[in-house]
Amino acid sequence: METREDAAVPLSFELNGETVAVRAAPAARLLDVLRGPCGRTGTKEGCGEGECGACSVLVDGRVVNACLYAALDVEGCRVTTIEGLHDGAGGPSALQRAFVTLGGTQCGFCTPGMIVAAEALLAANPDPAADDIRGALRGNLCRCTGYVQIVEAVRSAAAARRAGADAARAAAGAPS
Amino acid sequence: MSAARDAAGRTWVGRAVDRPDGADKAAGRTLYIHDITRPGMLHGKVKFSADAHARIKRIDTSRAERLPGVRAVITAENTPQIRIGFLRDNVVLKGEKVRQFRDEIAAVAAVDAATAAAAVELIDVEYEPLPGVFSPDEALAEGAPLVHETAPDGTPLTTNAMSLTFGHESGDMEAGMRAAVHVAEGTYSTPLIQQSCMGTAGCIAEFDTAGNLRIVAKTQIPFLAQRDFTRILPALGLAGRTVRVIVPALGGGFGTGLDTHPYEYISILLAWRTGRPVKIVYDRAEEFACLSPRQSSVTRVTQGCDAAGRLTFRRIDVVQDNGAYAAWGATYPSVMLLPATSLYRVPAVSFKAQLVYTNNPYCQAMRGYGNPEVTWPIESTLDDLAQAAGVDPLEMRLRNCNEPGEVTPMDLRVTTCGLRECLEKTGESLGWSEKRGRGSAPPADGARAHLRRGVGLASLIHVGGGGKIYRSDGSGIILKADDFGSVNVSYGGVEMGQGLHAALSVAVADAVGVRPENVVVNQTDTATCPWDVGTHASRGAFMACNAALLAAEKLRARIFAAAEDVYAEEVARNVAKARRRDASCEPPPPDVVAGARAADFDLRDGRLFLRERPADELTSVEFGRLLRAIHFRDAGTVFAVDAFYEPPTELPDWERGMGNLSANYAYGTQGAEVEVDTETGEVRILRMAAAHDVGRVLHPTALKGQIYGALAQGIGYALYEEVRTERGRVVNAGFTDYKIPTACEMDFPIDLHFVETNDPSGPFGAKGVGEPGLVPTAPAIANAIHDAVGVRITDLPITPERVLAALRAKRGEA
């Protein structure tokens, strides 16, 4: 009998800045490759049908539901999971700090996907209004928070990032 | 953060300290059941029934057994019979008859989840269909088929009515009805809804060589689960062996963890059969269709008032569709009694609840536990009554408001009560006096003439100081001070996202006298934590922090007594060190140091000092250094103290509905301003206000999250959530067809008010707050809809179809 392992093919991509080489079956979901052979369990499975967003990851900067994404489609791509979203020195990012400080996380199961989706939003729109944030996070379900403190956390993190960017520009002597 | 103390002497309680579990959650490092593996672990999968009511004629597992990778297939044939549920009416693996679509018939353990899933599909079951009953009306009809032909003890049954009895009669009902000048009545229904934890249910069971069970379980009742699992060991030939329940991080609870579930016993049976750890995790479709939802109910309510709008009587009859088996959720009426008897002052009350077995999925607990089901009709008919009496609904509620010190018809002894302030604050937030009753006026813009706005409000009473439904409502705690000045907390309640550990860490910090980052709350483990009845009834923070206060007092007393022996030496070290920096440094008076006794010491923010010299560095000793000095010497010692807090409450007499089951009661009012589209029936929320009597704020961020989150669940319950079934089969088992609120639905301002009544029973004055936030949400919205368009909706969820139908009926188009 043929097992799934026999059918697996090599797959190589960049995960959180590191090159990884694994084997994946043609039908494998990106979610299973991340949580299984890659050992990155921060990405959660909440529904398996693209409705809850707990498995949100970035593929070349774009938010996707890893539960619906074919693993082999990330060949050669840059994949970012919650584990890759730190401040560059292994500490929490502005979003992660704000989620903790302002009550954006409760049970925490939706939090990784929520932060990944918010990261993509802030990359595209550094100064989102509350409605922009709600719109960007509408694919990420949360049953604990009622979203109020999540939206506050994203706004606060956006402000912190803008201030940080301003400070960096000032330090570099660039015109603001 | 600076560590100033407030007037009540608290440094950390009431402050928005980062919650201790937050950083790992935001980094994706927290381990849920889905993330945990064990060496050699197998994956289990359950074969569920394909019929709602049928005899099982044959189960053929041979094809599944032959599938490579399968390690065990179990059925009722090859395992001991295990009965579960508090009525023992649910056999884990069904061999003779299925009573609901989700009945467990067989299970597989395989080397991976995909193989287990494939194997389950290879199990053939032949059924002989039986006629079923899919509503309480059908189930109670003459000659209806019986869901259970016999009681667990073999006694023949003749009805689907359950034997559980909940009732209440108080006051002079005849006099109350005679005194009523105005009467309002109605029949209200609530739907089946799903708790919708983002992290689905699951467990990993394994046995050690001696036959002791270790189970990692997504539960809210680790100690009752330990008892339940221990009870089945004799059937496995393991009498006398032990059970250890370990609780992982929970991806939400909301009541789903208040019972032990068939899948947990199946995991145990598979582990016992294979000798390997076995994990079962539900996928989302299983979570919807095979984990018990919240009961549906139908409530008939009648209330009357005198000419001045004072309530004279209230009658409530509830029928609850329990589904095929009894989980703890079958005891919802125990909590329904609170709003029925004690929400506002009513001199005569009658309450009856009838629970019925049907062939629908069996139901279990969800947040609020019967309270929303009954508050919805009470608060809806109260608005009708106000209208009949010509009294403003807010004024009506104020005239009947509960007050501190009252004893209610069910003998609840009210300590503090902030309901009046909750009502007033909600009214202010909504702009009640300007907006109420103006609903028919269309907004100025003519293009929006089909839109109507209205405001409404509703209140709640809930247990705020534990809820005694078991022979002990207590909680144990252990505080262990380590060599590094940290306090390790072992507590038996469960953090499931609500912020228990956040509240506990600031409470322990203040109670012991250390900083919150030096409080380490351990994951719940029955092997290391003392007994706790369970994290339900909004009791977690109330119980844990009260227990912590008792233990902290003991810990401080022991440490201060031991400090007498080492204190002078430690101060001498301070002096020597200071002198090396500054030779002219003046030492403290020798008699002050040498004569320091336990009563002279205080501990705050990790520093021991003399009460008389709080700011003096020379006479203060860092906590960790002090502990090491006491530990590492001749006849040294370490500190671990325990305490058990049992609240001063009583187990009610449920048949009479009497008894003071909680140490205090939480009150609150929520208000809504809505806009109703009279062409589509859609309801848009423009603003909500929520004023809650919380006793005292322990942790503001966690508290806000509890209220905002519950309110969002209340909105889902009010407007769109419903598990739909067709002859017992769940037809919307996923988030595609079962909608919970997204961020876009929560796009309106919410005014939160915390009314601090400083309850004498509460830790630092705090009451429990976990559930109240979803209790009055639906009637507040329904009352606002009535204010806007003059229709009374009596069935949840309030869908556009129902609003449109009501509008048409009002216009006489029915």
Image: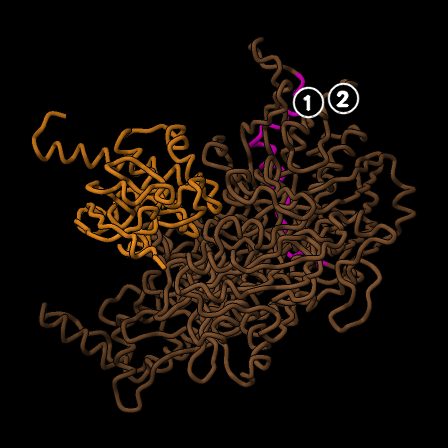
Chain colours: A orange, B brown
Spot occupied by residue B188 in the image (x, y as percentages of width and height): 74, 40
Mark 1 neighbour density, 10 Å: few (under 14) some (14–19) many (20 or more): many
Which of pointers 2 and 1 indicates the residue nearer the eye?
2
> From the viewer's perspective, is residue B694 above or below residue B449?
below
Q: Are marks 2 and 1 in contact (CB under 8 Å)?
A: yes
Q: Secondary structure at mark 1?
A: helix
Is residue A89 shown left or right of residue A128? left
Q: Amino acid at mark 1?
A: Val
Q: CA distance from mark 2 to mark 1?
A: 10 Å
User: In the image shown, does A151 or B180 lie closer to the viewer?
Assistant: A151
Image mark for residue B789: 1
View extreme (top): residue: B446
Q: Chain of mark 2?
A: B
Between residue B463 and residue B559, name the one nearer to us.
B463
Question: The residue tagged with tag 2: helix, strand or loop?
Answer: helix
Q: Which quarter of the figure has residue B261?
A: bottom right
User: Residue at label 2?
Assistant: B810
